[in-house]
Amino acid sequence: MKAKFAHFNFNVLDLKKSMEFYEEALGLKEVKRVEKPDFTLVYLGDGETGFQLELTYLHDRTEKYDLGEAEFHLAFTVKDIEAAHAHHEKMGCICYENKDMGIYFIEDPDGYWLEIVPLR
C-alpha cells in the first residue's frame, strides 16, 4: 500500500481575509471550492505541485480557533528568501526568525505558522 499527500486543512474564521492573505503572502490561488449549507471548503494551490491547502470555513463560527500550543506548521520554499522576507516584513506577518538556519515563520490571520525556507 502506498499513499500520496493530497491536502492539509486549516479551519479559518474569515474566509475572504484568509484567501487574501494566502494569495498576497504566498501566491496561492483557489483551485476548487465546495459550498454546503453549513460550511465552505476552498482548496488553494501553488500552480506547480499537486499539494493543496484546504481552508474550511464554518458559516456559524464566531470565536477564534484554539490552536493549543501551535506546535505544527506548513513549510514553503522560495527561490529568493531575501525578497520574500522583505515582502513579509512589509506585510507585518513575520512572527519568528532563525537567522542561523536561514529560515523564518509568518503567521496567518488565524494564528497558523508557516515556515519560509530557501530553495536549496
Image (cartoon, helix red, strand yellow):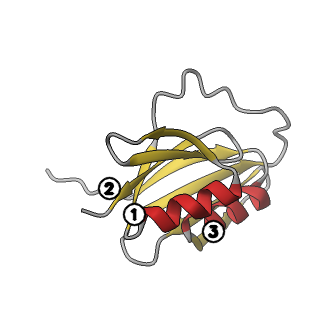
Q: Which mark is residue 51?
A: 1
Pointer 3 residue: 23
Residue density around tag 3, few if under 14, some if 14–19, many if 20 or more, within 10 Å: some
Residue at (53%, 48%) from the top-left corner?
9
Q: Percent x, y for residue 95? A: 59, 39
The tally of labels here is: 3
Q: Quadrant of the C terminus?
A: bottom left
Identify whether 5 is placed above or below 70: below
Towards the viewer: 51 or 39: 51
Q: Percent x, y for residue 64? A: 77, 33
Identify whether 90 is placed above or below 68: below
Element at label 2 = loop
Q: Percent x, y for residue 102? A: 35, 48
Residue density around tag 2, few if under 14, some if 14–19, many if 20 or more, within 10 Å: few
Residue at (40%, 47%) from the top-left corner?
103
Residue at (76%, 45%) from the top-left corner?
13
- Locate residue 119 relative to residue 112 in the image: left or right: left
Q: Amino acid at mark 3?
A: Glu
Tell me the quarter of the picture where residue 111 sits: top right
Q: Amino acid at mark 2?
A: Phe
Element at label 3 = helix
Tell me the quarter of the picture where residue 29 sits: bottom right
Q: Are marks 1 and 2 in contact (CB under 8 Å)?
A: yes
Q: Which mark is residue 5?
A: 2
Q: Amino acid at mark 1?
A: Phe
* First of labels 1, 3 by sequence position: 3
Identify whether 80 is placed above or below 75: below
Residue density around tag 1, few if under 14, some if 14–19, many if 20 or more, within 10 Å: some
- Locate residue 36 relative to residue 55 in the image: left or right: right
